[in-house]
Image: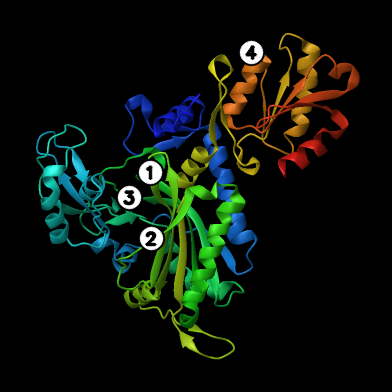
Amino acid sequence: MLEQKLTLEMIESLCKRRGFVYPSSEIYGGFAAVYDYGPYGVLLANNIKAAWWKAMVQLRQDIVGLDSAIFMHPKTWIASGHVGGFADPMSECKECHSRLRVDHLLEAIDVVADEKMSEDEINALFDAHKSEIHCPKCGNSNFTEAKKFNMLVKSNLGQFTENWNADPSYLRGETCQGIYLNYKNVLNSCRVKVPFGIAQIGKAFRNEITARQFIFRTRELEQMEMQYFVHPDREMEEYERLREYRWNYYRDLGIDMNKLKWHKHENLVFYAKEAYDIEYAFPFGTKELEGIHARGNYDLTQHGTHSGVDMTYLDPKSNEKYIPHIIESSVGVGRSFLMVISDSYREEGEDHDKRVVLKFPKHLAPIKVAVFPLLKNKPELVSRAKEVFQELQKQWMCEFDDNGNVGKRYRRQDEIGTPYCVTVDFDTLTDHAVTVRDRDTMQQERVPLSQLQNYLTAHLSA
């Protein structure tokens, strides 16, 4: 039998059916490009964030953590360039009035519209290819001129005139600005010296014109970012070290490295020295997963200029003064989540023996162990199974399941990626052992209860 090609629709179906991801506000018809993470989804997302935090903070003596506020002083976004330049090119279909991103329309016909193009340059490119472009909703090719649309989400926080255009505040468009604003606080309150980094996981908000591809591009997103402050002369040396470190992270995470590749940015913003993306082969194409950038001293210089605060660093050994340069790593939780599910998804067997299984790296699996009584109508089995479950859940995220026959329970656990299932049967009452079934091999092994925790510890860490 030919292997079925994985599609985004298959992933969306599984995520909804098995409690990983739901459309937000679904009872009201949903809210475009916003999603809720269900019971298994939040566990998987938390495990992904924990893996990133361990690699970027716990295992690094030169990086500290931060959790900055979602709201920042409005001048932050003027200094960063977001108020003036955080924009995507938008056009409207004159037939069905759908609002569309012009760079996405061009991308669909394999024409690249660089994000740094001016409005005139975008329109020239758009006009040259309009005959080849069709509205994805109605199929017509009748579009308005492209206009730049700012993606910052405005708020009336602290503003009581009900005039949102007067002194607006913003939901943050990216998490890194909170790191730049706290650079001096961290420097003055912690025992850090250049080179050092600040890492953060947090929500960001973007008023995307056309959000698409499930959780790949959303209006409310969560970022995992690290900004590393370095001596200007060592920027590119540290940049290459960071690139290697982040590439190896995905190998250690358990991702298929054949699905990852580097993509170098050809057209850089004026202050950047170099920029690479790590791309992953998603079911809908090879797309950006993580950005790694050498940003120079632009960010600290801008905030120093707009705030009047001196951002220079005094080297305690050489007494040299300079504004540190920054290299960054930025990756979305949603994109990492989608990568992990795509990488783990398998359909095995045929006909009635066919199973869908998520072969997660074990440390990322939402549920590590499921415990079953062989029969739910036998109190002695249920009682013993609950004793086993309560003991195991002290150490791992576990699930108790007594609904349906054991075969169906195995299939349910396969679909959420549980590495091990433990069944308590009648023999358990006399031999004090249980049957442990492996998710990946489907092999079963009899394990004494006295050795069960050690067995699972060894296999879950393998």
**Which residue is more in the foreground, 59 or 242?**
242
Residue 43 higher or lower than 318, as above or below: above
Which residue was labeled with disc 2? Answer: 72
Residue 283 higher or lower than 49, as above or below: above
Q: Looking at numbered disc 2 in the image, what kind of residue is underneath it?
A: Met
Whole-angstrom CA distance, mark 1 to mark 3, is 23 Å
Closer to the N terminus: mark 2 or mark 4?
Answer: 2
Q: Would you say residue 158 is visible in this rendering?
A: no
Which residue was labeled with disc 4? Answer: 404
Image spot of residue 70 (x, y percent): 42, 54
Which residue was labeled with disc 3? Answer: 206
Q: Looking at numbered disc 4 in the image, what kind of residue is underneath it?
A: Gly
The quadrant where residue 194 appears: bottom right
Closer to the N terminus: mark 3 or mark 4?
Answer: 3
Whole-angstrom CA distance, mark 3 to mark 4, is 44 Å
Name of the residue lying farthest toward the front = 1
Quadrant, the C terminus: top right
**Which residue is more in the foreground, 200 or 104?**
104
Label 1, secondary structure: give it: strand
- 244 relative to 407 in the view: left or right: left
